[in-house]
Structures are given as structure tokens and as C-alpha cells.
Amino acid sequence: GDLPLRLLPPVVSALFTPGAAAQPLPGEDGSPLPESFLLYHGPGSRQATARLMDAWFWAASTIGTYVPLILAGFSPAERNRMKALLADTTALNSLFFLAPLPPPALAEVYRRCTALFHPAAEPAWGGPIRHALACGKPVVAGSDPRTEALVGPAAYLAPAGDARLMGAALITVAVEQSVSEGLAQAALARAAAWS
């Protein structure tokens, strides 16, 4: 017969909790992270970074100087490829790469970010969106059924293939404090429902 289906709670390390970061963290070049920043912690594949950069090019001219985009989780080869692609653009000035970090330091980055930008699909076993929600951070993500079910009202979703709408979502969350605060409260409520 049919076996019963039981849903398991999302996998999120206990390191990812709300609160202020305890110490400043360095970027790839050793300089401290900016006061406000968006975080991308996702795949560094060509397809994923093309989608990421299409949206960021649209948003960077408006917010990049004040709220840059921090990229985490990229291998050295992926970082070098991105830098080569962006060498002749002004977008490189609003992007910063994080050196590989141990889990406690990565959790600190999540606590410090303004919002998580995640246009890629969320892994079924857990990933950046769950980490951001656990830290009470707003999420800007691509709309797909799995992401919609995961985030509920805690994210600003836009079609992943629409760079203009995705960029507008980034600008809104970075600039509109009431939107960002509402998403953060929804993120905390969503994470609390997991326990």
C-alpha cells in the first residue's frame, strides 16, 4: 500500500540565529565588510552568475554605491572568471568577494547582511534561503513553487528570468525600510514555525 509521508523540519545549523554580529569580518582583500550590503551565497556556475549579474547590472546603478553585493561561496576559479567578465564594467566596483569562511563566520555574515539575494533554486536539503530566514533577514529570490512554499510572506519574489523585476526587488528591499522590516519580521515568524 501507500507509505505515509512525513515532512522533516528544514536543515539549518544552530549557528544561524538573529542578532547583531559580534565582530567585523573581512572581505577577500582583508578590508572590513561595508555597513550595509546584500549577500549572494549561491552557485557560481555560468548560468547562475549570468542570472545574478543581469539583475545586479539593473540595480547597481541605483544602490550599488550604498548597498554593494557581497558574493560568498565562490571557488577561486569562479571568482577569477567573474572578475575577468566584469573587468571592463563599473559593476565590479559594487561587488565584493568573501574569502572562504568557517561556518561561525559565515553565520556572522548572514546576521550582518541587509538582505539575501538568491535568484537560484534552493536546494531541497537546506541552503541560503533557510539560513537567511533563520537569521531574520529579508530575502529577494526567484519565484518558483519550492521557494514560494519555503518563504511564504518572508521574501520579495520576482520571476528569476526577468532581470528588471529582480533588480527592482533588490532596490525596493535595500531602500524601502518598511518593506525590509516587514520581510524581516515575516522571516523570524517563518523560522519560529520550524521549531
Image (cartoon, rainbow, N blue to C red):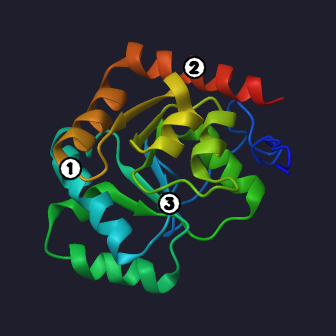
Q: Check disc 3 and report the residue beneath it.
A: 31
Q: Nearer the viewer, residue 64 or 15?
A: 15
Distance between mark 3 and mark 1 Cα atoms: 30 Å
Q: Which of 81 and 118 is in front in this view?
A: 118
Q: Residue at the spot x=57%, y=45% of the render?
A: 129
Residue 145 can be seen in this image: yes
Residue found farthest to the front? 1
Q: Check disc 2 and report the residue beneath it.
A: 186
Distance between mark 1 and mark 2 Cα atoms: 25 Å
Residue type for callout 2: Ala
Whichever of callouts 1 and 2 sits on the residue coming sooner in the sequence is 1
Residue type for callout 3: Ser
Q: SS at mark 1?
A: helix
Q: Where in the figure is residue 152, as x and y percent of width and height?
A: 53, 27
Q: Give the class, few, some or many, for how many residues have Cα within 10 Å of label 2's Cα (few <14, many ≥20).
A: many
In this rendering, the answer to whether 106 lies above or below 139 is below
What numbered label is drawn on residue 163? 1
Of tags 3 and 1, the one toward the viewer is 1
